Each structure stands twice: as C-alpha cells, then as structure tokens.
Image: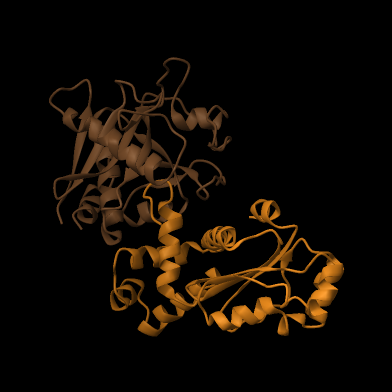
Chain colours: A orange, B brown
Amino acid sequence: MTTFLQENFSGFGYVVLGLGEMPTSAVTNFEVDWHQKYFAEQYHRVDPVFKFFADCRGRSGTRLVSEAEMETPLYEEAKLYGADSNFISVSAIGGSQMVLGGVNHDLDVTRASMIHKSCRAAHRSILLERVDQLSDLQIDFLEMCEEGLIDKQIACELGVSISAVAQRKKAICNKIGVSNFRAALSLYSVRKWSGIVPLV
Amino acid sequence: MMTNTFLVDLRDPSSRVDLYADCLRLRKEVFISQMGWNLYEASGCEYDQYDIPASIHLAATLNGVLVGCIRLLRTDSVHSGVTYMILDAHRGKIPNLPQGIMHEELVSESVWEASRLAISTLVPGEIRNQLLIGLVDAARRYVQEAGGVSMLGMMHPAFLRTFRRAGFNVRRFGPTAPQRDGPICVLRWDFVAETSERTISVLCSG
C-alpha cells in the first residue's frame, strides 16, 4: 500500500475508521511535526478532506480540491510541510471507512478516479488482513455462517443462546473493523478462498 | 444440487480421462483469467511441470458441469529436475511461493501431495465447503487405495478448521507464510485406517 501511495503522491495520510469514530492519528509520510500538530489542534475539523468524508455519509467518493478551496490558513500552513492535499478518497466497506488525503497537483479527474479505485482495493486489503487475526473459535463460527446455518442452528450447535450468537457476530465485526456482519462474512470468504475461488 | 467427483488418471483409460482437458481449462479460467496469476498457458489450458502422466486428477461436477479439480502427486516423485510442488517451494525453487514452509522435508511413497485446487465461481458459497470436502475425501480414498497414509496441501490456515469440522485428521505441517493472496500454510492429512468414513461421508452428502 505504501509503495502505491508513494508512487502517486509526494505526501499522503490516511485513517481507517469505524462508523462514528473520530480520527486521532493517521498513517502518513508527512512530517512528524505536522502530523502531531494536525491532530493536537484538531485541524481535521476544518480540513476539506474530512468535510468531504462527512458529506459522503458512509458512502465511497473521490474529489480533487480546487486551488480556490486551498486559499485558506490551513492550506497555507500545510503547504509549508508539503501537506497541502488536493486529492481526497473516501472508501466505505461494510461500515468501515478509509479517508485518504494525498498531494499530487498534476492529477486530472480521470487519473484521480483510477487512484480512488486503488485506494478502495487498499482499504479492502487492510480489512482482509484483519481476518487473519480471528481466533479459531471465531473461524469455526464463520464456517457455520458460510455454510448457510441460521442463528438458531448455530446456537443449537454451539449450545448457546441466540443473543450469544449475536454477541459473537458483533465481536467478529469489531475485530475486522466493520459494522455489518454480512461484510465480515464476505471478507472472511474472500480471504479464506483466495487462490482457489476467484471471489471479487 | 447434485455434486459428484471423478478420478482422472491418464494411465487408466477406464477413468474419466475425458475430463482432463476440462480440468486444465478450469485451472486456466480460475488462476489466469480471473486471478491474474502469471502461469503458463497454451490452448486454453493451464499446466506446469507437475502435470505428468503420474499425476492424478480429481474432478468435481455440479449438476453435470465441471466446477472443481485437484491434482495429486506422490511425494517421492522425481522427474526432469523437479520433485513435488510443496517441496520445491520449500527449497525456494518456485518464484512467487514462500520457502521454508515445511517442518521437515518429506519424501515417501506413502505420502501424496494435493495441489492446483481450483473451484469455479459457479459453486454457491453455501456448498463450497461441501464440494471441497468431497474432492479431498475422494483424494483420501484414492491415496488409501494406492497404499498411502498421508497427504499434504498448501492452503489458507482457516481450512484447518474446515477439515477438522468435517472429521479429517489434519494438522499444520509448517509455519504460516505470507504470500500475495494472503497467508498460507502446509496442511497434513493423516488417513489412518479407522478414519471416520461415516462422519466424512455424511458431511459430503450435505
């Protein structure tokens, strides 16, 4: 992921957030001083990157920030650190959202759209890697779900209540960072069957 | 939905040799056309240095359509400078596959390797496990009939749970290693005589 971003941006920063979650730090190659100041001063509250994120309302989207929009004190300061991001990508998968700001003032809309697709794929990869952190019991649970067992059948097989099944689904969602269990199950299947079945 | 598995043995005309090219075409479709792997392809088929007359193939059909296949090779196979895929990968001889993936090098006439497992997207998610288990159980039957006792395969670690739930005696036979499509590890199935045939057959029948 970092390589792909370094190839396209002189500077970038991204966060992966759950629904309603606020950013406190970012994965970035911007200067440490800027990164610390950005979150200490809560610049994300006025940053067009996060304004666009809010406007997306849980959906994916991309846009380029115009030069006129960059005529603000925030951008003036960001420019000193090479952090005047003009590219914004918001990716939404099952309640997980990745917000990325990147600096590349040569981008046109077509190229930006292509990079946005790559950002979506990168977001998916981040979530797929989290599947590998699931416990054996959580994998057993997902196996039953993948085979189409309904909650009542799973509860019966595990000897637990229906509400315990719901709790286990929530725990799996939390670990992967999504809010939608169908998305968690889909990510699990994609990860598990990769190299055998070409699931998209 | 009706699933079946068939043996494809190029040395045995009574087996379903007519499905051989279909298996290679399915592999080409899955690995090259859809996953974009950089593998050798000719005449619409994918094949490699391990597709030799001694290789056994198992084909799975769903409602009469070929939707899955797997290849078996004895681990004491040596030909044209190659052994079997997992051992060659372990020794660092296969680009794009991790090395050092086995607890120990295993070469035995009673241990087989399963590789090139491919399943079509035509198979609905809820019966994918059933089809896979059908293929691996058909492999178990073949290996046992041939005097074998164990089988190795390289898969995502989650399959350890899938096969245990299905009644197989399976364990890791090496560390989990990262690769492009996610982590993989070598699994080892041990087919002891008292392998729970009943349990597995019940699961295979859905």
B39 with respect to B89 (left or right): left
Q: Which residue: 48% across, 29% down? A: B106
B148 with respect to B12 (left or right): right
In which quadrant of the rendered view does residue A77 lie?
A: bottom right
Tell me the quarter of the image containing the N terminus of chain A.
bottom right
Q: In this view of the protein, which residue sits in the foreground, B7 or A32?
A: A32
Q: In this view of the protein, which residue sits in the foreground, B201 or A167?
A: A167
In which quadrant of the rendered view does residue B100 lie?
A: top right
In which quadrant of the rendered view does residue A69 lie?
A: bottom right
Residue placed furthest toward the front: A68
Q: Is residue A61 visible?
A: yes
Q: In this view of the protein, which residue sits in the foreground, B126 or A81?
A: A81
Q: Is residue A174 visible?
A: no
B152 with respect to B124 (left or right): right
| Residue B9 on image: x %, y % | 23, 26
Q: Which residue: 52% across, 72% down? A: A60
Is the residue B187 above or below the residue B87 in the image?
below
Is the residue B165 above or below the residue B8 in the image?
below
Is the residue A66 above or below the residue B83 in the image?
below
| Residue B143 on image: x %, y % | 29, 33
Tell me the quarter of the image containing the C terminus of chain A.
bottom left
Residue placed furthest toward the top: B80
| Residue B23 on image: x %, y % | 27, 36
Q: Which residue: 31% across, 26% down? A: B55
Q: How many marks?
A: 0
Q: In this view of the protein, which residue sits in the foreground, A113 or B206?
A: A113
Q: Which residue: 37% across, 79% down? A: A160
| Residue B115 on image: x %, y % | 38, 36
